[in-house]
Image (cartoon, rainbow, N blue to C red):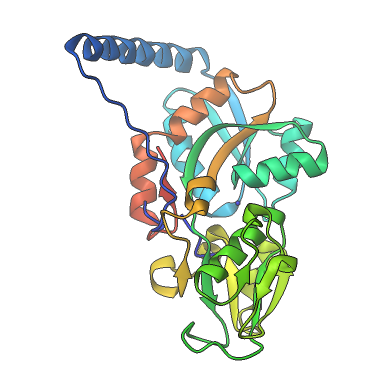
């Protein structure tokens, strides 16, 4: 799915999983289960030696994160082939057609919307990270003095446009219909005190608009690719406790029916490893937040 919103994006949409054991027998059972799972994983990795897994991904941060997983899979004799795409359409199409085994670039609401609009049969096999959306300065450098008639560019796909409008509303720039939720469009704007003009553009194009507009609301991955820092450049980002932060986990996706493919499961385990979490925390300045 730049300045993304994604270990705190710092406002991560924190998907927090808590597990508590209250008795010694429960702890012992859990330990036994974990031991069995580790043994099973090791056996699976051995069985998959010589296997190649092909994954479609956005260059940043998804392909970069996959390169960490690639090293872990290589230790099991598994080859991970990463195919990079700069748009949000082709990765899903090649996954649906079987040209690749999986993709990693999008959040669940975008996936649901894509399936509905395109008749595809794609499903998530696991949450990996969250990227907060951010408002980045163009010709105007502050949200405290918004020019009358300011031009703001936002992503034009259904779910990310709604996120962008919600972020603008959270900053008091506009007001949107209360029940618009995650399907909000510019038609749901009810109050516009600064007479801002909201322009919808393909998400990958947004960084290039900043020289000509007052602000751009960008996805984290595209902000990173354009050299922006979430912590230093964004004027505002989605809050970790926001609905968006709780909803927009970036997921590993496959065609329905391939969820339990051993290679896919090995990839999921690598992506949800401590090594990947450490890499995310050390690399992205809060623009990417691990959800495992």
Q: Is residue 47 visible?
A: yes
Q: Nearer the viewer, residue 282 or 74?
A: 282
Instruction: Determine the residue positioned at 27% across, 9% down.
Output: 29
The image position of residue 240, as x and y in percent, is 41, 55
**27 lies above or below 226:** above
Position of residue 90 in the picture relative to residue 249 (left or right): right
Q: Is residue 7 left or right of residue 94?
A: left
Above-or-below relation of 290 to 3:
above
Residue 283 locus on image (x, y percent): 38, 55
- Whether 54 is drawn above or below 224: the answer is above
Q: Position of residue 111 (x, y in %)?
A: 67, 42
Considering the image in quadrants, where does the C terminus appear? top left
Q: Residue at x 47, y 85 (%)?
A: 142
Quadrant location of residue 177? bottom right
| Quarter-of-image position of residue 185 | bottom right
For residue 83, say whether it is visible: no
* Figure disc tally: 0
Which residue, as the protein is rendered here, is positioned at the far left?
24
User: Residue drawn 41% across and 46% down?
Assistant: 14
Estimate the x, y position of residue 218 in percent, counting from the top left.
58, 66
């Amino acid at each position: 799915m730049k300045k993304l919103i994604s270990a705190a994006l710092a406002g991560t949409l924190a998907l927090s999983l808590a597990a508590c054991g209250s008795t010694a027998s429960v702890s012992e059972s859990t330990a036994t289960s974990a031991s069995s799972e580790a043994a099973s994983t090791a056996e699976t990795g051995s069985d998959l030696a010589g296997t190649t897994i092909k994954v479609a991904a956005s260059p940043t941060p998804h392909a970069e994160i996959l390169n960490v997983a690639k090293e872990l899979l290589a230790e099991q004799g598994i080859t991970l082939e990463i195919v990079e795409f700069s748009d949000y359409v082709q990765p899903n199409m090649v996954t649906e057609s079987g040209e690749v085994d999986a993709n990693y670039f999008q959040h669940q609401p975008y996936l649901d919307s894509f399936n509905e609009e395109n008749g595809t049969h794609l499903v998530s096999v696991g949450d990996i990270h969250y990227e907060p959306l951010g408002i980045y300065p163009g010709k105007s450098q502050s949200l405290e003095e918004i020019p009358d008639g300011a031009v703001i560019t936002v992503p034009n796909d259904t779910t990310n446009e709604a996120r962008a409008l919600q972020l603008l509303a959270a900053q008091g720039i506009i007001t949107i219909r209360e029940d618009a939720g995650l399907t909000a469009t510019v038609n749901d704007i009810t109050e516009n005190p600064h007479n801002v003009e909201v322009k919808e553009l393909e998400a990958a194009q947004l960084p290039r608009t900043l020289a000509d507009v007052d602000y751009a609301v960008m996805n984290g991955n595209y902000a990173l690719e354009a050299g922006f820092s979430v912590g230093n450049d964004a004027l505002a980002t989605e809050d970790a406790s926001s609905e968006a932060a709780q909803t927009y986990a970036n997921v590993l996706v496959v065609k329905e029916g391939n969820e339990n493919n051993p290679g896919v499961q090995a990839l999921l385990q690598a992506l949800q490893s401590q090594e990947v979490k450490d890499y995310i925390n050390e690399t992205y300045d809060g623009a990417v937040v691990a959800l495992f």
